[in-house]
Image: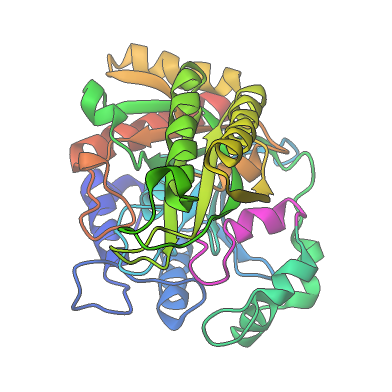
Amino acid sequence: MTRELFSTNKMKLLFEKLASFSSHPNNKGVTRIAYTPTDQAAHQYMMETMQQAGFIVRQDAIGNIFCRLPGKNPDLPAVGTGSHLDTVPDGGAYDGTLGVVAGFYALMQFQPQQLSRDLELIVFRAEESSRFGFSCIGSKVLLGAVDNEKWALNLDDNGQNFFEVIDECGYNSQQIEQCKLPDDYFSAFIELHIEQGRRLELEEKNVGIVNGIAAPTRYSVKVTGHADHSGATPMYQRHDALVASAAIIDDLNRAACKEAVWGTVGTIGKLNVYPNSMNVIPGEVNFLVDIRGIEPESIRRVADHLKDSIKKSEHDNEVSINIREISSENPVKLDNEICHVIEQHCIEKQLKYMTMLSGAGHDSMNMAKKFPTAMIFTPSKDGISHHPDEFTDFNDIIIAADLLKETLYSLAK
């Protein structure tokens, strides 16, 4: 394989080859759980492909892959790109993998020492939370954001924690601290990814320029009322936990809608009702709240409204309500200057583009804490992701890959 011959058709073949690495090859979806033999095989294949192309390739102590094209001045911070290869169970072929393949395609368009700065493609390990319960492990390790205690306590389905698994795979958990990247490692980092939503498709745009990544604030809410006979208990004597919950849910939705101008969203996606019987007034309801956004003050306003709504519903329905914060992460604003470079290339190429936020988390949200970072989104058909029907038209992939190439050139020339 040579750079001169690496066409968009070669990129498509590489993508299709990586899609074949699945633990359940007869299923429509792709299952490549982090550090399983299938995941290891996919990473090994990608490393061999990089080495055959003449890149400088290395792995760190947890298996992150680094593929470097030398520039004229190795003392300058490099320009980076990358994504991940692991998937959720029965997921799609595009999530993460597209960013790796497009990044490889982009690097293949340049010769060693053609640009002033080095270019480097990173294949992050364990971006999905499917195995260990927490996400973006590879990029967190590169930033030195390792929570040894929590990571040791979280076990996979086999009863192993992250450290045990990587040691079993031949990596070295004792050298994780050495994986941390220096502050001047990258001058810029760009991740190409599928949108995992419908905005681009509905707006008929080919490209999304991502200038921020939302972060979740999550709560667990327990509503305790009193279970009674649905026929024998008058309406005015009820302590209905579900009615109280419904008022809160509706109120949260209204509060989030008021903050929509800031890109904030609120969701209650899991709800358990007890005793869950048609002829019994619900005595207890447990539900989970997920508030996401890019503006901290907007997130706080929705969270405060939730708490006020809980107090009101508790009083109005004569129930007891307990709220517990599960997590509160900081949203990430991406680099305006890199976004501007991407936008200029979109204008020059007369691409249909829009500036947008990412509602899903990505490795870029960690990279952005240390390096100027931006993202390029390409459309997802019907907004489907983490599902076998995940799909992006290859013409859109070519547009995004070429845009990534041009952006890397501008930042590294």
User: Magenta region's main secondary structure?
Assistant: loop
Residue 111, how many percent across, how many down? 47, 42
Measuring 72% from the left and 43% from the top, which residue is drawn there? Answer: 185
Say whether residue 116 is visible. Answer: no
Q: Position of residue 130 (x, y in %)?
A: 48, 67
Is residue 140 shown above or below 317?
below
In the rendered structure, the answer to whether residue 75 lies left or right of residue 139 reads: right
Q: Nearer the viewer, residue 235 or 316?
A: 235
In the image, residue 110 sits, relative to residue 141, either above or below, namely above
Asked whether residue 220 is in view, the answer is yes
Dividing the image into 4 quarters, which one contains the N terminus? Answer: bottom left
Residue at left offset 43%, top offset 13%: 344
Please give left or right for residue 327 compared with residue 148 in the image. Answer: left
Residue 131 included in the magenta stretch of the image:
yes
Residue 393's image quarter?
A: top left
The answer to which of 322 and 136 lies nearer the viewer is 322
At 27% from the left and 14% from the top, the residue drawn is 350
Locate residue 61, reporting x and y percent: 69, 70
Give coordinates of residue 94: x percent, y percent.
31, 53
- Using the rendered view, name the quadrant where residue 75 is placed: top right
- Colouring convention used in this rendered image of the protein: rainbow
User: Quadrant of the rendered structure where residue 49 is?
Assistant: bottom left
Q: Is residue 197 magenta?
A: no
Stretch of the chain drawn in magenta: 128-145
- Residue at x 27%, y 18% (from the top left corner): 352
Nearest the eye: 304 or 170:
304
Nearest the viewer among 347 and 227 is 227
